[in-house]
Image (cartoon, rainbow, N blue to C red):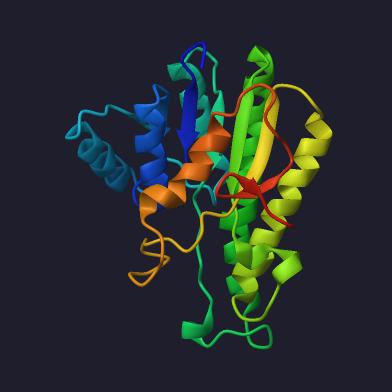
Amino acid sequence: MAETRIALVTGANRGIGFEIVRQLERLGVVTVLSARDPVKAQAAADKLLSEGIEVGVVPIDVDSDESCAAGLKQVEELFGGRLDILVNNAGIMQDGPSTGTTAMNVSIETIAHTFNTNVLGPLRLIQRAIPLMQKNNYGRIVNMSSALGQLAEMGGNWPAYRLSKASINVLTRVFAAEIGPGNIKINSMHPGWVQTDMGGANAERPVDQGAETAVWLATLPDDGPTGGFFKDKKPMAW
């Protein structure tokens, strides 16, 4: 990259988000670590500092309009009105085979809560981030999706989570179409089954591998793709 970029990563106090922050910083990107809980966010930043990696910390609860607005305002003030990269990593999974949840018995509350975090959270931040990116004619937005939201391979179970991840892919496509070609790019990605609190200890991928595609999308060259869905830096079917 020709100049230092400013990145914001949500849900970054642990797991894939934490690793994305680590990898971006190692590439020279000035990165803000964000999480719902300010204590956990600072603890994560302190852990990185022990590795010689210094990051900014801005608490953001993606479920809250007010928190998203305040968080983006803080980033804007810290970096002179700039935000170059937004990684929408924060997400929840409240259903699945282990919970006995199916499309027939999933509660509206579970679906609404999952949507608020996994879909409306990114929407809140994207709407506020794009004007900052347009000021400098540069932006990279990465939406954390999942193969469980892939219509081409859609199956049963995880109804709330599947619905939310299919919807984040729609969000990616809609924004990409509205922004159009240029130097603000928005893409979705599937990290694979990763060894995190959500993925579990039996997952097949280490967290550093799960973060790689997000970091690649966050640092795309000017001729890179937009409006796509990727795994291992390769396109996936929607």
**Residue 226, quarter of picture:** top right
At x 61%, y 24%, the residue is 221
Q: Position of residue 75 (x, y in %)?
A: 47, 25
Instruction: Let me know if residue 2 appears in the view.
Output: yes
Residue 210 lies left or right of residue 25; in this view the side is right
Q: Residue at point 62% right, 21% down?
A: 132
The foreground one among 238 and 157 is: 238
- Residue 151 relative to residue 109: left or right: right
Q: Nearer the viewer, residue 140 or 230?
A: 230
Q: Is residue 113 above or below residue 171?
A: below
Residue 106 at x, y percent in the picture: 62, 81
Q: Taking 17 as reference, is 149 above or below it? A: below
For residue 228, which quarter of the picture? top right
Rendering coords of residue 35 (x, y %)? 40, 45
Q: Decide which of 58, 191 is in the foreground and name it.
A: 191
> Count of labels shown?
0
Q: Quadrant of the C terminus?
A: bottom right
Q: Is residue 151 above or below residue 97?
A: above
Tell me the quarter of the picture where residue 56 sits: top left
Q: Is residue 36 visible?
A: no
| In this rendering, position of residue 148 left or right of residue 4 | right
Q: Position of residue 79 (x, y in %)?
A: 46, 16
Query: Which residue is painted at 68% across and 78% down in the image?
Result: 155
Q: Which residue, as the protein is rendered here, is positioned at the far left?
A: 50
Residue at (70%, 24%) from the top-left corner? 223
